[in-house]
Image (cartoon, grey):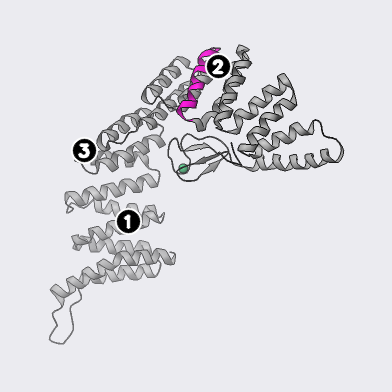
Amino acid sequence: MSPEHLFGIVVILLPVAALSGWYFGRKDARVDLDGGAHVPVMSQDYFKGLNYLLNDCPDKAIEFFIKVLEVESEAVETHLAMGNLFRRRGEVDRAIRIHQDLVARPSLDREQRGLALLELGLDYMRSGLLDRAESLFKELLKMGMYEQQVLRHLVDIYQQERDWDAALEYSRRLERVTGEDMRDVRAHFYCEKAQIFIDDDNLPEAFRWLGKGLKEDRKCVRARLLLADLLNSAGDYKAAIMHLKKIEHQDIDFLPEAIPRLVKSYRELDRMDELSAYLSRLSVLHCGITPVLVLAELTAERAGLDEAKSHIVAELKIRPTIRGIDRLIEYSLASAQGEPRQNLLLLKETTTRLIEDKFSYNCGNCGFTGRSLHWQCPSCKSWNTVKPIHGIEGE
Ligand SMILES: [Zn+2]
């Protein structure tokens, strides 16, 4: 056991020592005729337990503390605290043992039993025994205790189990209890459900669930992107464009995700002038380097590199980015000769490496960074918080 762990346990046991003193003082501070004091059984067991902890034998310590509990019901809170400490330290088996022992005691009052059930449920969640945690939390709901906390944990469990129907149902219940708007999160549950049908090639059901997702949250970018993908695959490019263009008004940070899909739709329709006009408008909004780079590509195809370069230079003057500089070097290389060309090649090598090494997405909630887009942050589990990185190293 680490020194800080031991320190934590001892701190938790301090109230117990105080309780022993109280017990000692109130009942047993009688001085015998021979001058000795009675030492109560409870404090003996506690100090034996403490001794085991100090000697790094936590399991033996738990046995002793559980014995104390049989004698002294006021020790329940201390046991709960001790169990929590074990769980926080990752020693979940020990936490489970303490909390299971508490739950099994008929002497516990309703409040104590409710709290012990909640803690045991958290232990089970922590150790991945989700079905056991789920049944304890449902028992608490029946008892009418810890409703908000329990509903939140149940929504969390159903997400982990990828049971999206249950996640939808319990998030609605949670919303009713807390008044917290969870429509944006539920739209993701609908998208998850749709994704299952997409993977099964059941496109009508996928469309149906994406429609429900958008009904839940009109601003759900993920539903728009998935719909655009399905529509592009089905050859309905106009409808795909309609969905993709809405993203600008829903969450402009996600436009870089929409643009490659828009290029595909417009190319299929052979309406690249329209796309150029749209990208020119986006470039003025300075919502990322992606629209500028795509516009430069289209300009290079139609009007040559000098014209394309002017788009990049105009953007770099206002918002310098590594990707913009990299593209400018690429266009400049086409006409460079001799030593300037060698220098540009050296610079290009550096910018390419910088782009390859960087993360493209980060979570606004916990700071997680990654190379691919996650709708639910893998670190803090928040929905909608991972976005493309903007700034000199990103968009
Ligand atoms: Zn996060």
SS for dot 1 = helix
Q: CA distance from mark 1 to mark 2?
A: 54 Å
What residue appears at the point 35 percent right and 30 percent down from the top-left corner? 183
Is residue 105 covered in magenta?
Answer: no
Quarter of the picture containing the C terminus is top right
Whether label 2 lies within 8 Å of ligand 1 gets the answer no
Residue corresponding to mark 2: 232
Label 1 vs label 2, nearer the camera: 2
**Above/below status of 302 relative to 289:** above
Left or right of residue 81: residue 143: left
Horizontal and vertical percent position of residue 49: 31, 67
What residue appears at the point 59 percent right and 39 percent down from the top-left corner? 394
Left or right of residue 39: residue 132: right
Q: Is residue 136 visible?
A: no
Q: CA distance from mark 3 to mark 1?
A: 24 Å
Please say if the residues under marks 3 and 1 sit with CB atoms less than 8 Å apart: no
> What secondary structure is the stretch in magenta mostly built from?
helix
Q: Earlier in the sequence, mark 2 or mark 3?
A: 3
Instruction: Identify which residue, 237 or 86, lies in the foreground.
Output: 237
Tag on residue 83? 1
Q: Earlier in the sequence, mark 3 or mark 1?
A: 1
- Mark 3 is surrounded, within 10 Å at the Cα level, by few (under 14), some (14 to 19) or many (20 or more) other residues, namely few
The stretch in magenta equals 231-251
Q: Earlier in the sequence, mark 1 or mark 2?
A: 1
Please say if the residues under marks 2 and 3 sit with CB atoms less than 8 Å apart: no
